[in-house]
């Protein structure tokens, strides 16, 4: 089988929107598994890559999550504030550096050690974003500020410290519906709180 790059021939790329992020429509030829070529059209939404983290206190069996308004979830019919792991776009810095800054901004906790656990494309059918997933231990003394995010960026974030068992159960009840948070809580169930 030939390399994937040899099986894709870009024909045209049209920018449909370049407001909040970049939405493009691309026409390309793709060589199928049987060797025939097929012309396809795809729209891709490029918002950049991001990083997310689950803060945990193993001794107290707690985690830090956030709760905030997410307009796309709202217009999809979700009428609650979304409970999430802290996260942010990389903005041209390393995933580790970004997540350290983001967690402090959103939660007020200064993380001393972070561990990258995996990377994942969250919606590869239409969004180019790759997320870098981290975990990091915290203690009560690591909280140096209130957190809450930046009002200038439209953030109004509530910081939640929850028993891990309660947070994990919230996946099953539907109280947590954010994919990155579900993935990190499942990781914690297997590797941190097992």
Image (spheres, rainbow, N blue to C red):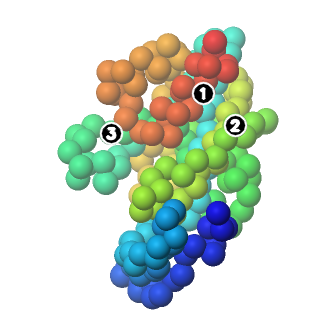
As displayed, is residue 86 above or below residue 39?
Answer: above
Q: Secondary structure at mark 2?
A: strand
Quarter of the image for residue 23 reads: bottom left
> Mark number for residue 100?
none
Alpha carbon of mark 2 to alpha carbon of mark 1: how far? 9 Å
- The quadrant of the picture occupied by the N terminus is bottom right
Among all residues in the image, which is located at the extreme right? 113
Element on which disc 3 rests? loop
Q: Nearer the viewer, residue 105 or 191?
A: 191
| Residue drawn at the location 72% of the way across and 40% of the way down | 116
- Locate residue 91, reporting x and y percent: 63, 65
Q: Position of residue 86 (x, y in %)?
A: 55, 42
Q: Which residue is mark 3?
A: 81
Location of mark 1 (residue): 187
Q: Is residue 30 above or below residue 59?
A: below
Q: Is residue 159 visible?
A: no
According to the picture, the residue beneath numbered tag 2 turns out to be: 117
Residue sitting at x 35%, y 46%: 69
Q: Nearer the viewer, mark 2 or mark 3?
A: 2
Q: Nearer the viewer, residue 121 or 100?
A: 121
Mark 1 or mark 2, which is nearer the start of the sequence?
Answer: 2
Q: Are marks 3 and 1 in contact (CB under 8 Å)?
A: no
């Amino acid at each position: 089988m030939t390399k994937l790059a040899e099986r894709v021939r870009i024909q045209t790329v049209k920018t449909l929107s370049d407001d909040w992020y970049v939405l493009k429509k691309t026409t390309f030829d793709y060589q199928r598994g049987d060797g025939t070529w097929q012309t396809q059209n795809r729209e891709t939404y490029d918002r950049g890559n991001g990083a997310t983290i689950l803060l945990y206190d193993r001794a107290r069996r707690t985690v830090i999550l956030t709760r905030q308004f997410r307009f796309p979830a709202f217009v999809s019919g979700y009428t609650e504030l979304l409970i999430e792991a802290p996260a942010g776009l990389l903005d041209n810095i390393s995933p580790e550096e970004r997540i350290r800054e983001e967690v402090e901004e959103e939660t007020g906790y200064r993380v001393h050690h972070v561990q990258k656990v995996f990377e994942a494309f969250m919606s590869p059918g239409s969004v180019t974003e790759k997320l870098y997933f981290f975990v990091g231990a915290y203690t009560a003394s690591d909280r140096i500020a209130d957190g809450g995010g930046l009002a200038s960026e439209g953030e109004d974030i509530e910081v939640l410290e929850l028993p891990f068992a309660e947070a994990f159960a919230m996946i099953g009840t539907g109280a947590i519906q954010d994919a990155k948070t579900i993935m990190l809580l499942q990781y914690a169930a297997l590797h941190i709180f097992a």
